[in-house]
Image: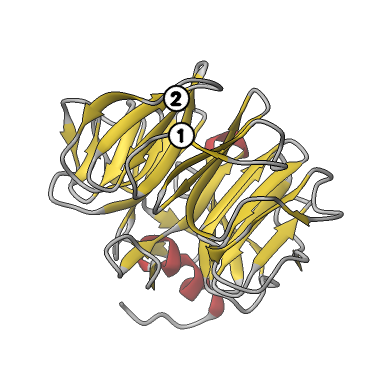
Amino acid sequence: MRAYTGLALALLATVGLLAVRIAAGPTGAGIRHAMAAAPDRGLYYAAPGSLLLVRPEGGVRLLATTLGPGTPLALAADSDFLVLGTTAGVEQSSDGGRTWGAAPVAAGHYPAVFVSGSTALAGEWGGAIWTTTDRGSSWRRTAALRGEYQALTALHGEWFAATLTGLLRSPDRGASWETTGTPPRVMALQPAGDQVLAATWPGQIFSIGAIGDPKLVTDLHVGVWTLAAGLAATTDGVRDSGAVALAGREVSALVDSDGILYAGVAGGPVELSTDGGRTWTQLKVKSSTATVT
């Protein structure tokens, strides 16, 4: 990593070059980018201690330097409510990322977070699923058993949790959970119409609804990190059922920000696509004093 002088340049460099290596990945050592969709087709990007707001044209703004001590693992946002999972716990913001505070959950690694409206979910690696339904004013532990949680989502009042033992579903907002019959090592979730897509680390993608068994949609035969916009971020590029972009590169994060796609390359930069993932260019982050390439 190149050395920059000054706080501003160091923070800019994180967008292009910073990623987090953790031991919670499916292979025992993965690299994650903590990022989420921001207003006006932008991107929130969490670096250790700081949050950046990145625009698709390359503009960047430092929103906060008050994040907690943990290393960022996962970020979720809806309007001005943001939740960040870290190696030390969960941080939250209700003003668009400008100020932050620790959520009252158990200390631990949180690689899975989800936000929709006033509701948020946070899944601990080797722990529990916690939830708030009042924008972080209070949190409670759900009835989910201890697990290695990788992803969380909700659809029509049903909650879904991806774990290393399979996909869990809750019909009653966390009061009870049931297994769904997927294979183990579920890594990624994405709502799609009346179904939720669930991807396993070996590359199988299933669809499942509020009731019934999961149905196999496709098998990509590569490790899947996450899903967004009908695409899969994998150990070998960004894929749909046929085409491959960013081939040969491990993509550990994928965000759809109102049609602008951002892909976090493991150990590398953030790539941007304006055509649905067919072509990608490295995000050039600019400020009034520097350009990071």
In the image, residue 189 above or below residue 252: above
- Locate residue 3: give its quadrant: bottom left
Q: What percent of the width, then of the height, locates residue 268? A: 29, 62
| Residue 12 in view of the camera | yes
Question: Is residue 14 left or right of 218 when viewed as pictured?
Answer: right
For the N terminus, the quadrant is bottom left
Question: Is residue 166 left or right of 289 when viewed as pictured?
Answer: left
Given contact means CB atoms under 8 Å apart, are the residues at marks 2 and 1 in contact? yes
Sequence order check: which comes first, mark 2 or mark 1? 1
Amino acid type, mark 2: Ile
For the C terminus, the quadrant is bottom left
Q: What percent of the width, then of the height, locates residue 50? A: 60, 69
In the image, residue 89 above or below residue 245: below
Q: What percent of the width, then of the height, locates residue 80? A: 73, 44
The front one of 105 and 59 is 105
Residue at position x 26%, y 36% from top?
A: 204
Foreground label between 2 and 1: 1
The front one of 158 and 96 is 158
Q: Which residue is mark 2?
A: 208
The kind of secondary structure element at disc 1 is loop
Tell me the crowding category of disc 1: few under 14, some 14 to 19, or many 20 or more residues within 10 angstroms, Cα based. some
Amino acid type, mark 1: Thr
